[in-house]
Amino acid sequence: MLLNGRRDSHLDIDIIITTDRTMMTDHHGKEFLGFMATGPSIGLPEFLWRYICCPKPKVDEYGRPIVAPYGLRKVEALMIDHGFKASVIDPDYIDRYIDDAKVLMVGHHDYFAFGPPSSEWWLITRKDPVNRKSFIEFMSNPAIKRAKKRGLKIVAGGPAAWQWFWEPELWDRFGVDLVIDGEVELVLPNLVEKLINGERVPKYVFVGAEDYPDIDRIPDIKYASVNGLVEIMRGCPRGCSFCSVTFKTLRHYPIEKIIREVKTNVRYGIRHGLLHSDDVLLYGTMDVIPKPDPLLKLHEEVLKHYRTIAWSHASLAAIVVAEREYRLMSRLTDLIYSKGEQEYLGVEVGLETGSPRLAKIIMPAKAAPFSVEEYPDVAEEAFAIMHDLNIIPAATFILGLPGEVEDDVIRTLELLDRLKNYRSILVPMIFVPLGALKAKSAGIKGLKLTRSHIEVMKKALWHSVYWSDRILKEFYLKGPKYMPLRLMLKAFISFIKWKVGQIEKEISNLEEVTLAITDLQEAQVKAVAQS
Ligand code: SF4
């Protein structure tokens, strides 16, 4: 193709691996800003909102993003290692390749905004979240439709693969040939081969634990990942019934493998990284007691290459054991901060509930090695440890779990009250059936919010507004480089304060509010059909 009299640089590829802009972005190097894409634009024009949460990353002359989501990088490496001509391409550049491509692969954390916290934003604001709009816009690209008519095959995967069942009309309309759910290393190359050869493959493949790869079958990424994310292990031993990770068996990456991926990132100029695991503190152990040696060694090695790091997830019980038994949280943060490059550490933690009764039913091992009855105390102790060590958690908790009774919600309210003095962001989530509960549940029907639910959500919101303000000022977006972003976020927080005040007035007399995502979904599909 000629552009301004010049021929576009072109790769010889058969497989385009991509996703929409809310995923193909570096979030300005601040992973946490990505959360904004899970909501609709509120108080800001949508283009500004999108600029804050999902700016376009740099691309090379071929339209390949310099950084891409880690999951896409893994699939890219897998396909290349199996002899396919494949590359991650930025969504703005797929037109350059789509007419010659044989397969378009897409991945996402939350294709249609049914995952947390998108569904909560959607339910509360009754406006489509940005991630949903962006993905539907991307898939509606006329070039994809044209290529589809010619015979392009489309494969969708990633942690949100299950959401296609909730959008059968879009599954059909976009002509997705295969939706694949789970760890794909051992099965995807063969399925893609079949698709390319015109052989029949199932429309949906769920990869069970028996098909999960050993670590040596998981390829190393070949190019840089968003925010320097590198996986350090897969799986979690706690087995919470609402969690899809439950299906995964525990496997640890050897340090050499992790460092190879870190070095790949460094080669592309990425010097700030994120260690990814469902519980970083369980690296190197097969039970729930953190082990100092592998953890310290891992951090020492990674910090030889990265200037700063963050953790994806840690469990509250592991934080408490690590500190009580080995002063391990203090030793790890001493190590991380000793480079003088960072003064705080971000992490996501699952608080889930403040009710030991409910915890016993849905997550009996969450507090292990402590008893489930101690869970609220363990949670508070973990928050206190993190506060003292400048670890800033984004803590999620779930409302509307099957079996939840009013008293459980009140216990959660009490726990949130105990956490008010600890620097943190609290994120309520409305139950979405995943993990073992997926089979038992009728699905996403919505939630009858009782007065206690509303009180819990209000408490979490005011807590998060208060602490966000302080975190922005004291830690997160310091320095002149982030001034425009800081100002926009401050304006947003002021707007939220005003808006919440209004909503509080509106619902102050109501005992119950019913939110139903299925109504919204039907409305959305109808709106698309009419347009
Ligand atoms: S919710 Fe967290 S602790 Fe529970 S099984 Fe999932 S990853 Fe493990």
Image (tube, grey):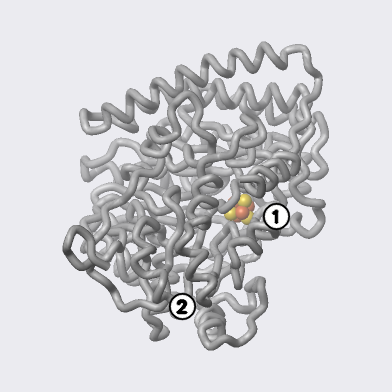
| Label 1 sits on residue | 166
The residue sitting at 72% across, 51% down in the picture is 433
Q: Is residue 512 left or right of residue 500?
A: right
The reply to whether residue 492 is visible in this rendering is: yes
Q: Mark 1 vs mark 2: which is more N-terminal? A: 2
Given residues 224 and 135, the one toward you in this image is: 135
Count of residue discs: 2
Q: Position of residue 328 (x, y in %)?
A: 41, 47
**Label 2 near label 1: C-beta < 8 Å?**
no
Label 1 – label 2 distance at C-alpha: 27 Å
In the image, which disc is placed on residue 102? 2
Instruction: Looking at the picture, tell me which residue is in the foreground, 517 or 144.
Output: 144
Which residue is rendered at x = 36% and y = 38% of the image?
Answer: 51
Please tell me in which quadrant of the rendered image residue 154 appears: bottom right
Residue ID at (67%, 47%): 525
Looking at the rendered image, the quarter that the N terminus falls into is: bottom left
Q: Is residue 190 left or right of residue 389?
A: right
Residue 301 in the image: state x and y as whole percent. 28, 60
Q: Position of residue 148 (x, y in %)?
A: 53, 70
Q: Is residue 522 left or right of residue 396?
A: right
Which residue sits furthest left? 5
Q: Helix or strand or loop: what does disc 1 sit on?
A: helix
Q: Amino acid at mark 1?
A: Trp
**Pick the front one: 317 or 146:** 146
Q: Tag 2: residue type?
A: Lys
> Residue 244 in the image: x percent, y percent?
64, 58
Q: Which element carries disc 2, helix, strand or loop?
A: loop
* Residue 249 position by quadrant: bottom right
